[in-house]
Amino acid sequence: MTEPTPIEDLISGAAQDAGGWLGSLPVAQLATGADGTIVRWNRAAQELLGYAPPQIVGRHIAELLHPGADRSLGRALWETAVTGRGVMGTVTAWHQDGHPLELEIWACPVPARRHGSSSVLVFAADAHAARRIRGSSAVWDGLFARSPVGIAILDTQLRFLQVNPALEAMNGLPESAHVGRRLTQLLPEVNAEDMEEAMRQVLLTGEPVLDRRRSGRTPAEPSRDRVWSCSYVRVEDPGGRPIGVIASLLDITEQQRDHTEAEAGRRRLALLSEASARIGASLELERTAQELADLAVPQLADAATVDVLDTLARGDEPGPGLAGGVALRRLGKAPLTGSAVIGILAPLGRTLVFPAAAPYTTALAARRPFLIAHLDEQTVASAARHTSKPAQLLPVGVHSFMMAPLVARDLVLGVATFYRTSPVGPFGPDDVTLAGELAARAAISIDNARLYHREHETAVVLQRSMLPQHITPPPGIEVAHRYLPASDVNEIGGDWYDVLRLPGGKAALLIGDVMGHGIAAAAVMGRLSASVRALARLDLAPEALMHQLEATLDDLADPMIATFLYAVIDPVSGRCRITRAGHPPPATVGPDGTVRLLDLPPGTPLGVGGTAYSTTDLDLAPGSLLVMYTDGLVEARGSDIDVRLAELARLLAEPSASLDQLCDSLITQLVPASADDDIALLIARVGTAPHTAPPP
């Protein structure tokens, strides 16, 4: 038969199991007679002061006091026995191993059965530990009651034991509704299962969990989602066993919203920055439209299309307006594959015609972004009589829709359309603003492309019209010529050449290059070409003709510079007079194949002014070639000009069946696939048989 456990051991064990302050503060229990003799001494007293019961029972309680301590304790205890009042105070006791120990004691009389006598029951505890616990209690009570942070204490089964007023306000429920229930039972509209899993890990490992996000709705605000930052810490008893979890919650809804808005703003700025770098860099209509669609998906929308006025796509002007409806050509679409939405929408290259009353047309006419935040059967009904496409979009998950017109310089050029199927929510005002800014950038690029191509075509037409259409050299001279525009559309320039009949059977061969590009260069080239034709017929000396061309350039409102090479040849005598104005040197090829790069005074380009031009005379043997060219033939990026001229001489030395074949050979071998500049080439053979005119 097992011996019964002493009642004080049961109390101590229960205190340890319960945890909290009762388990954290060992309390010694002893009893004395009315005369102060110790009659009872429990295990906690032995652990506190070191004496075993046989060593202490029967001794006077005053013997426990430190030798230097106040000996009034005995008198106080006797007073309690006589008067029946309790006493509480702090004394310094003498530990069994010889060191002093400050104790807090609580003493009270216990009446004895015999009349007139009583014993005294004394409780004692370590004074330092007692003060620490009282301070912690005060701090905890103040923090728990007054903290704006929500605090909850939960047991090992994750049931609420206690919540503070701040958490009551957050959850919209009183403490009584919390106690005994779990979070999953109490707040089903937050991510409670995730939170409980975090608390289980804390109980299991002892490692705190910090800043775990809880989101959802509570009875405090049932119509609005909120976000909380939650932290969990395990509570342990003195033996290190888990007895629960303390949870702290901070409402961070506003901070999260600010962070989300700031992050969205950064993403918008990044997208706009990328749009500025990518959209319209090529000045190609189709590429610009596709770049806009590619940028929008998936950062703004799940699908996007870009449609441009059909007249623009054909290379014409925008047209009369939208009063009679609009025809749009689809030039951009994203994603190109793998989307049910894209499968429904018209393919790239398709022309879509919308009458004046169609929603597409009215949205374009308004020149403002158009939004249907929540797309449903009712909102698509207005478009059903014009097209079945909107109704087909609903079953594949399109729930939000917006359009942004492409408007530049007060001119409607097309429209970009955006579709959303993902569960991130409908398009909002910020999305509409972003779509409008992207569309505006694309519209400017499209209009720049339109204006540039119009200017480019004008420059090309002007330049080609200024080049000689039919060259008819005088008898005794055979010519071949080539003109090659630069591969870059930005490089339409002012290169030209000509062959003119002069009095006395002579011929003028000329070639020039107006510095600059575009319409301005082509126009100046045309003006110089016309001036040379008029002046040459006056049979002016070459240097006099140069000065007249200088005057022509001086008359221009904007200064222009041109290089020029002018040769007058008598095919009968072979006499040749050449004047050079900053132009690359011509070459000659003798009948025996000898090649010379003529070392002529270089002169300065026309338009510089203050130059006295000189003329060089030379004799060309019958069958000799005179080769004139612009700098595009011999200049190339990263190549030395002397090396290029040497290569030209090598190619001229190779036998060639005809002048045309020689022209083609020079172009093919000297000009890379992407020429940086226009190229003009003129080759004349001097001393040939008389020219025979073609039959009528």
Image (cartoon, rainbow, N blue to C red):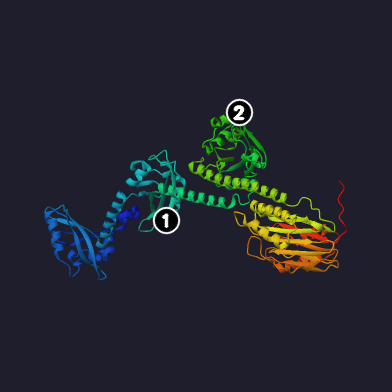
Of 242 and 677, nearer the camera is 677
**Label pair 2/1, CB-CB below 8 angstroms:** no
Q: Which residue is mark 2?
A: 385
> Which quadrant holds the N terminus?
bottom left
Can the viewer see residue 561? yes
The crowd level at tag 2 (other Cα within 10 Å; few <14, some 14-19, many 20+) is few
Can the viewer see residue 297? no
Local secondary structure at mark 2: loop
Label of residue 208 in the image: 1
**Residue in view at x 65 percent, y 51 percent:** 519
Q: Earlier in the sequence, mark 2 or mark 1?
A: 1
* Kind of residue indicated by mark 2: Arg
**Residue in view at x 54 percent, y 52 percent:** 273
The crowd level at tag 1 (other Cα within 10 Å; few <14, some 14-19, many 20+) is some
- Where residue 576 sits, quadrant-wise, is bottom right
What is the CA distance from the residue labelled 2 to the residue labelled 1?
Answer: 63 Å
**Residue in view at x 39 percent, y 39 percent:** 219
Drawn side of residue 381 relative to residue 460, left or right = left
Drawn side of residue 94 relative to residue 270, left or right = left
* Kind of residue indicated by mark 1: Pro
Of 170 and 420, nearer the camera is 420
Across and down, in percent, residue 672 comes to 73, 60
Q: Up-down: is 137 above or below 354?
A: below
**Residue in view at x 76 percent, y 64 percent:** 577
Local secondary structure at mark 1: loop
Across and down, in percent, residue 295 comes to 58, 48
Of 273 and 440, nearer the camera is 440
- Where residue 46 sits, quadrant-wise, is bottom left
Q: Nearer the viewer, mark 2 or mark 1?
A: 2
Drawn side of residue 469 relative to residue 370, left or right = right
Across and down, in percent, residue 422 comes to 55, 42
